[in-house]
Image (cartoon, helix red, strand yellow):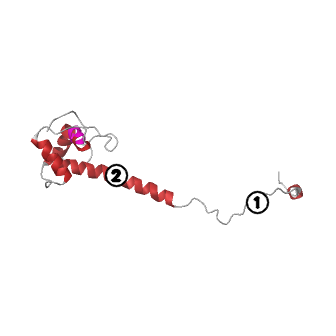
Amino acid sequence: MRNMGVLLDELHFPFGFKTNSTFSPEEVTILESYGLTMRQLQEGNLLPLTAAEYYFLAELDGELPTTSHFARCWRKYNNKITRFDNNLTIRVKSKRATPVRDDSGLNISTEEDDNDEEYGSLAFDL
């Protein structure tokens, strides 16, 4: 697999992969070294050149069982960031589902009354 640079996911791992206890040291090395390549391959922005890259895509598509370190590590990474996003979406939807107030019993009249006398009878304590 080609190394295209260091993968930095500042959105989900702002302090890096090493500070998170989710990934082993070997998985951190794989993600940092080959993460950009794996992301580009998965998104279809990069064509596979090596047998490892073809095998990686076949494992992600479900054509072959997931046995390589690349595919296992990438699936673990995707599950971690997807689970975070799904939980956030569920929390936002559940907040929107509850009504803020119930105005169903409220009567609003648009007719104007010329009876302003009741405002004159208000008492104010100063």
* Residue 89 showing in the rendered view: yes
Is residue 37 a member of the stretch shown in magenta? yes
Residue hosting label 1: 109
Q: Secondary structure at mark 2?
A: helix
Q: Position of residue 31 (x, y in %)?
A: 21, 42
Dot 1 surroundings within 10 Å: few (below 14), some, or many (20 or more)? few
Q: Secondary structure at mark 1?
A: loop
| Residue 5 picture quarter | top left
Dot 2 surroundings within 10 Å: few (below 14), some, or many (20 or more)? few
Which three-letter amino acid code belongs to the residue tagged 2? Phe
Residue hosting label 2: 84
Q: Taking 104 as reference, is 62 left or right?
A: left
Measure the alpha-carbon separation of dots 1 and 2.
48 Å
Which three-letter amino acid code belongs to the residue tagged 1? Ser
Question: Which label sits on residue 88?
Answer: none
Q: Position of residue 112 (x, y in %)?
A: 82, 56
Name, please, the residue furthest toward the top.
5
Is residue 15 a member of the stretch shown in magenta? no
* Nearest the eye: 116 or 52: 52
Q: Tell me: residue 120, above or below residue 41.
A: below
Q: Taking 98 as reference, is 108 left or right?
A: right
Q: Which residues are magenta?
A: 35-40
Q: Position of residue 110 (x, y in %)?
A: 77, 57
Q: Position of residue 18 (x, y in %)?
A: 24, 42
Q: Taking 125 as reference, is 21 left or right?
A: left
Q: Which residue is painted at 10% across and 42% down in the image?
A: 51
* Residue 23 showing in the rendered view: no
Q: Which residue is painted at 17% across and 35% down in the image?
A: 3
